[in-house]
Amino acid sequence: MGKYKIILYVLLIVIIASAFSVFLKFQTNTSSIRIGLTTALTGESSNLGFASRNGLLLAVEEINLAGGVNGRNFEVTLLDDQGKAGVALDHTKSLLAQGINLLLGHITSNSATDVIPLINKENALLISPTISHDGYLYHDDNFMSINVPASEQGDLIVQHIVSTNPTPRIVVLYDQNNPFFAQSIYEKCATLLKEKNIEILSVQSFQSITEIPQIISDLLQDNPTNIILIQSVSDLIITTNQVKKVTPNITIHTTMWGMASEVIHGYGESMENVYGVYAIDPNSTYSKYIDFKNKYYEKYQMEPNFAAVYTYDAVRLLAEAIAHAESTDPAEVKQAILSIKAFKGINSDYEMHALGVASREIFMIHIKDGETVSLP
């Protein structure tokens, strides 16, 4: 009898262990997928940071309401890096310590200076909606951006300048608080202009907006026909007004960082001589974009800028890659992104190539008669 009892006990233990294993597997498969977004919710780039947050929350809400990813909902941790590299690094360490290794961010290239080496060391994955510094791209590592390299903005600016004025007199002003982004664009502009035998007359930088009036006065001493401004939207508005007080007919070119919806929709005629690189076509009739714009406005009572659109796209990309990989392991998710390659964006489709570089269309836009015009 004792022998049969032992056999029964063994069978009971096996059944309990099997049931517990199934329970653990069920718990693992239905637990939430934890992701982190670190962005600039304060500071000079907070307009883009808040838009990024809004785009993420809208995407996560839609995905979770639709049943999540492989039956699992996203759980989001949001942190404010203030657009500062040190704060961004501290927040990334905090997220990794919590076991969150699928990360989105940051808004400015400067913020990620020390984050990317840490991400690579800890085998996490960082997908940025907006970072574009060429120096961070073209590496086989754990950083990917769905934005195009910043140098492509330089391409578009130079193309437009020389197409409208074969003999321009050009000066440049850039913000030292985002030096890597500014450097990528400035160097590309300078290289292309030199190839066309066009010299940049003067280059100035600033750290504080209080410096701008004097700097603008100095730059305009060269009687430029064109000025390239590489700065945030809040600074762009101030600088543009300062420039127009002295030289109302000068042509101004700016970047995605400055050409946000606040400029497009809030300043109308005062920005009519401003041409800006923009990440999306604001006049797109793409049904997904129209639907997104309507939902975004209903939820946040404002128009979405490119940071909102690109962050929404980034969350959708992450969800598709996790579903494809059937895993949340960062290495497997990264490989899934590269395997899928072609993604459907809500404003335009794009591709992710080896080394984490995106290819997608960018636009030159202009305010005319108070309306936004996308230039061919």
Image (spheres, rainbow, N blue to C red):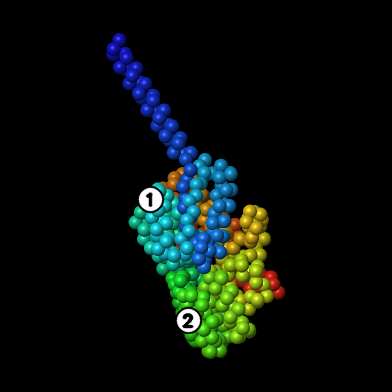
Q: Name the one closer to the observer, 202 or 193.
A: 202
Coordinates of residue 7 in the picture (x, y in percent) = 32, 17
Residue in view at x 56 percent, y 60 percent: 51
Q: Is 86 on the left-hand or right-hand side of 293?
A: left
Residue occupying the far left of the picture? 3
Q: Nearer the viewer, residue 147 or 92?
A: 92
Q: Residue at x 51, y 46 (%)?
A: 74
Q: Earlier in the sequence, mark 2 or mark 1?
A: 1
Q: Quadrant of the C terminus?
A: bottom right
Q: Nearer the viewer, residue 242 or 307?
A: 242
Residue 147 appears anywhere in the view:
no
Q: Which mark is residue 8?
A: none
Dot 1: element = helix
Position of residue 135 measured from the top left corner of the image (x, y, whole percent) = 41, 68
Question: Is the residue marked by circle 1 packed among few (<14), some (14-19), or many (20+) residues within 10 Å?
Answer: few
Residue at the outermost right position: 369
Crowd around label 2: few <14 · some 14–19 · many ≥20 (10 Å)? some
Q: Which residue is under mark 1?
A: 97
Residue drawn at point x = 36 percent, y = 58 percent: 118
Q: Tell me the quarter of the image containing the N terminus.
A: top left
In the rendered image, which residue does mark 2 sit on?
Answer: 204
Q: Dot 2: what SS?
A: strand
Which amino acid, mark 2?
A: Gln
In the image, residue 167 lies at what x, y percent? 56, 87
Q: Is residue 203 above or below residue 360?
A: below
* Image coordinates for residue 206, horizontal then vertical, percent: 47, 77
The quadrant where residue 360 appears: bottom right
Amino acid type for the residue under numbered disc 1: Ala
The reply to whether residue 9 is in sight is yes
Q: Nearer the viewer, residue 122 or 217?
A: 217
In this rendering, the answer to whether 296 lies above or below 148 is above
